[in-house]
Image (spheres, rainbow, N blue to C red):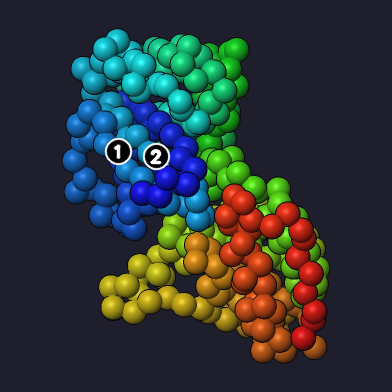
Amino acid sequence: MSSTAMKKKVLLMGKSGSGKTSMRSIIFANYIARDTRRLGATIDVEHSHVRFLGNLVLNLWDCGGQDTFMENYFTSQRDNIFRNVEVLIYVFDVESRELEKDMHYYQSCLEAILQNSPDAKIFCLVHKMDLVQEDQRDLIFKEREEDLKRLSRPLSCTCFRTSIWDETLYKAWSSIVYQLIPNVQQLECNLRNFAQIIEADEVLLFERATFLVISHYQCKEQRDAHRFEKISNIIKQFKLSCSKLAASFQSMEVRNSNFAAFIDVFTSNTYVMVIMSDPSIPSAATLINIRNARRHFEKLERVDGPKHSLHMRMR
């Protein structure tokens, strides 16, 4: 792996059977939800390096959640596991019958993080929410969130409800990865300029392999607050369907009387989605503008990329 890579250590922890490896396999290994049933339990720690946006590499530590392993993490492996951590992701099975033990292990993790990586960001995923009755989900999640925030002090944690069967998994992981992108503000500034120049309603940037949303800009209010993660889920499944037919997903255009949506390869590490509602702008012009912006955004993905903003000439 290149020595210039910016590595970020991410701990994925939680009780055995909580769903850690399933979600990792869906996000990073192109599994579909039903195929995760054949995954076995993680033994000790599984390491994987995921290249993400050029120089950024996620050093993902998937830590087995059996009691023996958990105890070792806090004793003999404590320094090795918890040193230099950028992000701790702790997964809770919402239907666990050992909630007290789950909370004890979580607090032990926080103590080790506070000692070894006090600046790490903490995320808690209340997982398998699909098993909870729909009318009870908001209440149960709110109660768990309040408990976890209280237990996390003096550290702060961000909580998400998740399930491998819907878009909530993409929402959580997009939010987590967003925190790790080093030049995200510069990226967003240039995406805003791009959207305004081409007169788009909205522009979304997806990471190419995972299809997680890493940046977006909207010029017009949209009704569906969950549209990003829904799109991630749908297109990721469509990409997998293409690969099963030995085909490679390249681009897509969807058009009706109200808008046109363009999804296209953008840089070597991203796809872009452009939403247009102005019928006077032909598809060819939008596709040319996407092509013209590619080189600039390629440079932005490098940590040492240009500091100037995007300026394009409308076609």
Q: Count neighbours of disc 1 (C-alpha within 10 A) and say few if under 14, some if 14 to 19, many if 20 or more.
A: few
Q: Quadrant of residue 263?
A: bottom right
Residue, x 46% and y 46% (percent of image)?
5
Residue, x 54% and y 18% (percent of image)?
118
Query: Relative to 286, is 15 above or below?
Result: above
Apparent side of residue 77 relative to residue 106 in the rendered image (left or right): left
Apparent side of residue 63 relative to residue 232 in the rendered image (left or right): left
Q: Quadrant of residue 47?
A: top left
Check disc 1 and report its element: helix, strand or loop: strand
What residue type is disc 1 on? His
Q: Nearer the viewer, residue 185 or 19?
A: 185
Residue 114 showing in the rendered view:
yes
Query: Relative to 78, is 45 above or below?
Result: below
In the picture of the structure, the residue carrying the numbered disc 2 is 59
Q: Earlier in the sequence, mark 1 or mark 2?
A: 1
In the picture of the structure, the residue carrying the numbered disc 1 is 47
Residue, x 57% and y 35% (percent of image)?
138
Count how many numbered circles sit on residues in the image. Answer: 2
Residue 175 showing in the rendered view:
no
Residue, x 50% and y 38% (percent of image)?
161
Point out the residue furthest to the front here: 3
Q: Quadrant of residue 310?
A: bottom right
Q: Count neighbours of disc 2 (C-alpha within 10 A) and say few if under 14, some if 14 to 19, many if 20 or more.
A: some
Are dots 1 and 2 in contact, CB under 8 Å? yes
